[in-house]
Amino acid sequence: MIRIIMHGACGRMGRVISDIVKEDADAEIVAGVDIAGRDDAGYPVFTDINACDVEADVIIDFTTASAVDGLLDYAVKKNLPVVLCSTGLSTEQLDKVRETSAKIAILKSANMSLGVNTILGLLKSATKVFVPAGFDVEIVEQHHHNKLDAPSGTAIALADAINEAADGQFEYIYNRSDRRAARDKKELGISAVRAGSIPGTHDVIFAGQDEVIEIRHIAYSRSIFGVGAVSAAKFLAGKKPGMYDMQDVIAAQQS
């Protein structure tokens, strides 16, 4: 039985993951952390992470960037691995994540779904065909109006997969409104939409002469991210210090 601390227990994803774990015979949420507090969780919820004294095997984090520094310090103190799902981290915070991974196991992923992480591999293959053939590349992502960061961490992960396969030749362009010039071949455009209750849609467009290929991922509910996070927690519990990602989880499931 994997014992989980849910960091962000009152948020949308915290509640989704709580419901998923209730039906999982191999996992249990033993405590939660959230500044809002919560009385209906079925487990103790602490408003201050440093007050959490419950024994656990792993932490799942779905909060905001502002809470990540305190989380990492706590995880090191308690020697707990972290499934880090919060996005919008600063450069300094990303550096701290990497430094902390020398002390504990950290699985960081901008998107926890099986579909998106499979698409990352597909994009690398597609890039090696379409980019040398002169195709332009654009990414359009859509999320609910409460999402704070833009573009999404998933959009950046998709762009990074493409750019890695293209030997780093692309410059990311987030805003064309201040440009009056033809599109450069070394541009990779990333556009963000924030509206309604859209859980998440990502479109990658390879556009050539008289030919367009689109790869789309649609999240119809947040449960796909929750299932991935719980799978990641099971994988990460007991792992040695280091940086892990969802590709490691997928590889472990296939072995």
Image: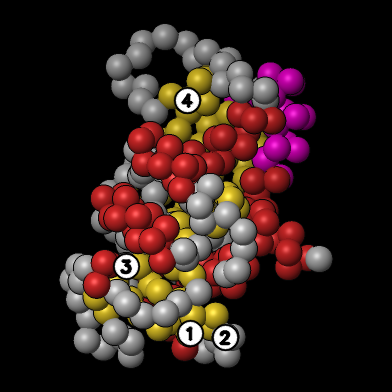
Mark 1: which secondary structure? strand
Amino acid on which the number 4 mark rests in the picture: Tyr
Q: Label 1 vs label 4: CA separation?
A: 41 Å
Query: Which quadrant of the structure image shows residue 85?
Result: bottom left
* CB contact under 8 Å: marks 2 and 1: yes
Q: Label 2 vs label 4: CA separation?
A: 43 Å
Q: Which residues are magenta?
A: 122-136
Residue receiving disc 3: 8
Mark 3: which secondary structure? loop
Q: In the rendered image, which quarter contains the C terminus?
A: bottom right
Q: Is residue 141 above or below residue 239?
A: above
Q: Is residue 26 above or below residue 123?
A: below
Q: How many marks?
A: 4
Of residues 28 and 19, the one nearer the viewer is 28
* CB contact under 8 Å: marks 2 and 4: no
Amino acid on which the number 2 mark rests in the picture: Met
Residue receiving disc 1: 28
Q: Earlier in the sequence, mark 2 or mark 3?
A: 2
Q: Earlier in the sequence, mark 1 or mark 3?
A: 3
- How would you rate the neighbour count of disc 4 (Cα within 10 Å): few for under 14, some for 14-19, many for 20 or more? some
Residue receiving disc 4: 172
